[in-house]
Amino acid sequence: MPAPLLDATHDLTLRSWVESANEPATDFPLQNLPLGIVNGANGPRPVVAIGDSILDLAPFGPAGTDRSALRALRAKLVQALGADAPTTPAERAETRRHLSPIKDADLALPAAIANYTDFYASIHHATTVGAMFRPDNPLLPNYKHVPIGYHGRASSIVASGTAVRRPLGQTKADDAAAPSFGPCKMLDYELEVGVIVSNGNALGTPIAIAQARDHILGLCLVNDWSARDMQKWEYQPLGPFLAKNFATTVSPFIVTLDALEPFRCPALPRPATDPQPLPYLLDPDDQALGGFDLTLEVHLQSADMTRRGIPPVRLSSGRTFKEMYWTLAQILTHHASNGCNLRPGDLLASGTVSGHGATERGCLLELTWGGAGQPRRPITLPTGETRTFLADGDTVILKARCERDGFRTIGFGECRGTITPAPA
């Protein structure tokens, strides 16, 4: 079995002279250093997060996006920010000059996303949703053979904190004779993990699965907002369209593969009765250590909760990402297997991440499902309000963290969006 690529930057005892980076609750200790982009007076500029601050990367030179360049930058930053690093007072003062509070930053999307593909890699999500529509045959025959995905809309991807307007669309109620057009009534979130592509491939040239990790910059959080009533009416025969492309929210920082090395884990073991992946999707190293052990959470705060100062309530939580049926390397390799040219900054999303348990489901469609033929089971909020789907004014917050004995816990920051009313 391959070993994680660990080095001195993963040392549990590392501390930073940026004191907030040493707080136990921070998402961004010295061992993380996720990448982001900030809008400034002179245009966007790259930064890393450290504690409650961001550090401008310009003084550290161009980083590049390949794995070796990012590893070298990471080592340089640990030297510059480490409490015990052999830096002079003048060097430390110069680095401090390029620090600023995260709360004051205009955080942009963490990459220039030109292309977006959404997958369906959680077998728990696929099985639960399939049971809603096909109780006798939840999984379609191709699911265990091929990573399922669709091309999304990059132009409507928005940074965390951007308001999401309830979409207008065509829907058809089960008891209606004809469809109607109006505001979506079944608006939902989807808890997903995104891959940001580092190095692309030439058109017509596939990416071998053994080299797939060399094309991954890192991971982020994705909320692929979904209009379920529009989706139900329009998805046959060609799949997702207007129910999905009105907005997709992405968290502001990319957690690099180097930061995630301590949290790699085996891919989900397949039952003996399941087919093995075809050879182009099967790599022993990827099976041994191609998963990532993340704890994912969804929180919701209604407009009334906000007005009354009631904090967001957690709707779901689980270490469910390590149970994905397809690894990130497999979905990237499959995407390029026909010669499709991936580009630096492309976003590949996992699809809704759900677990087997009722409290591990990654969307309201699943969380409030009462079973085949049963009414939906609303979620009750601390104010007494109930939800089967999202209401105007609701704020949805996605979070993720990685924990393992002997290593510093790291996080992803928030992926946040608030629903605003549909256009009049």
Image: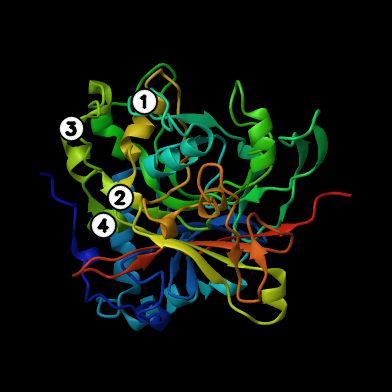
Which of discs 3 and 2 lies nearer the camera? The answer is: 3
Q: Are marks 4 and 1 in contact (CB under 8 Å)?
A: no
Whole-angstrom CA distance, mark 3 to mark 4, is: 26 Å
Look at the numbered disc 4 and give the secondary structure of its residue: helix
Q: Is residue 21 above or below residue 288?
A: below
Residue 146's label in the rendered image is: 1
Picture coordinates of residue 318 (x, y %)?
37, 60
What type is the residue that disc 3 sits on?
Ala
Q: Which residue is label 4 attached to?
A: 263
Label 4 or label 2, whichever comes before in sequence order? 4
What type is the residue that disc 1 sits on?
Val
Q: Is residue 160 above or below residue 310?
A: above
Residue lying farthest to the front in this orientation: 373
Which of discs 4 and 2 lies nearer the camera? The answer is: 2
Of residue 122 and residue 114, the one placed in the foreground of this image is 122
What type is the residue that disc 2 sits on?
Lys
Whole-angstrom CA distance, mark 4 to mark 1, is: 26 Å
Whole-angstrom CA distance, mark 3 to mark 2, is: 19 Å
